[in-house]
Image (cartoon, grey):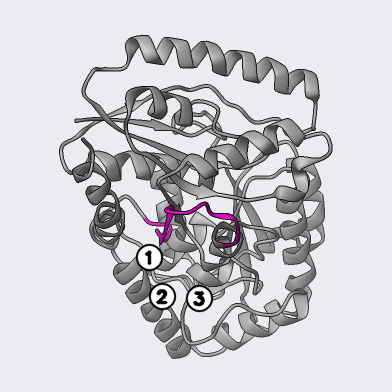
Amino acid sequence: MHIAFFAPLKAPNHPVPSGDREMARNLMGLLAARGDRVILASELRLRDGSGDLANQRRLAEAAAEEVARLDRELPADLGLWVSYHNYYKAPDLLGPEIARRRGVPYVLIEASRARKRLTGPWAGFAAAAEAASDAAAVIFHPTAHDRETLDRDRPPGQALAPLPPFLAASALPPAGRPVPGRLLAAGMMRPGDKMASYRLIAETLPALTHPDWHLHIAGDGPAGPAVRALFAPFGDRVRFLGQLDQADLQAAYGTADLFLWPGVNEAFGMVYVEAQAHGLPVVAQDRPGVRDVVTGPQPPVPAGPAGMALRCNWLLADPARRQDAGLAARRAVAERHLAPAAARAFWSVVTPLLEDRP
């Protein structure tokens, strides 16, 4: 059968790297793994980040045109519509209507309920996001925290199911060969939460006690100059790698001793899964979402640079301890965050929906 896939926040072929883009790509691979024909239904980006009513109207008009096009062009044997990441700033304005017209199951992966947004500058988009969530036969949630509001507001008969973030691989990459004292951070350089994470890292570094600590930073973006200024006091102990392609990022994971990323307001963070797959212990703040993917003998740390410095020092002071933490992280990724486990979790819930169709 044909399966339609749509990501209203960011298409899987979007030019700017991000965890959302990576997860969308992984999901398309998951859907195609059984031999079904997966269609990227639309590249239309429906995000309005500023609460601009005129922009929301333009996006809604563009979505209506896309619905008409898709209804004409999608194949007759369309059997399933899957959308990824529906929320009040980027609601799915395509999937529910096409699924209704074609009589196929509509499935959401990662949806946020935000009824407090039903008033204010995103009121219309928030209502559309709620309607999309209401229309889904099943909503898959990547973290336990996401389930709370989904469960509270779900309509009768809707299924909720976990689908942890996963790598598009059936096996772990080779374990890395870490350089003692090397920390790695990876994140887009932009204002807001990402910049807040970089500030916390800069505040953590002065308390590190390892004599040879040094930090590699992978990433770039509009806040690049501000990020570089943050780390200028540390001189050549901090090296900027720039924006890396996947192969170079894998090489960076492979030479690091640990992964340091605070995760300010991260939904979950694909970089944590990638780092742990290479055997890197993660030092991150204890936040909803992050704690669902960061594992090992010690959980994420309380918020603030003091706790992160303490955890870094604890890991770097004992190579055997660091290695044990990395091995535990790899085991957890192998069990929960690889493509075969994700495929089993998805199809065990969705297959009955397809079998129940008239």
Per the picture, the main secondary structure of the magenta-coloured stretch is: loop
Q: Residues within 10 Å of mark 2 (few under 14, many from 20)?
A: many
Judged by depth in the image, the label closer to the viewer, 3 or 1, is 1
* Range of residues picked out in magenta: 152-166
Q: Is 45 or 286 nearer to us in this picture?
A: 45
Q: Residues within 10 Å of mark 3 (few under 14, many from 20)?
A: some
Which quadrant does the N terminus fall into?
top left
Dot 3 or dot 1, earlier in sequence:
3
Q: For mark 3, give the secondary structure.
A: loop
Q: Are marks 1 and 2 in contact (CB under 8 Å)?
A: yes
Q: Are marks 3 and 2 in contact (CB under 8 Å)?
A: no
Residue in view at x 47 percent, y 70 percent: 179
Q: CA distance from mark 3 to mark 1?
A: 19 Å
Check disc 1 and report the residue beneath it.
277
Quick check: 340 above or below 259?
A: above
Judged by depth in the image, the label closer to the viewer, 3 or 2, is 2
Residue 183 visible in the snapshot = no
Which quadrant does the C terminus fall into?
top left
Residue in view at x 21 percent, y 23 percent: 77
Quick check: 241 above or below 280?
A: above
Q: CA distance from mark 3 to mark 2?
A: 18 Å
Q: For mark 2, give the secondary structure.
A: helix
Dot 1 or dot 2, earlier in sequence:
1
Q: Which amino acid does the dot numbered 2 rest on?
A: Ala
- Relative image position of residue 174 (x, y in whole percent): 28, 64
The image's mark for residue 329 is 2
Asked whether, in this view, residue 335 is left or right of residue 121, the answer is left
Quick check: 75 above or below 106?
A: above
Q: CA distance from mark 1 to mark 2?
A: 7 Å
Q: For mark 1, give the secondary structure.
A: helix
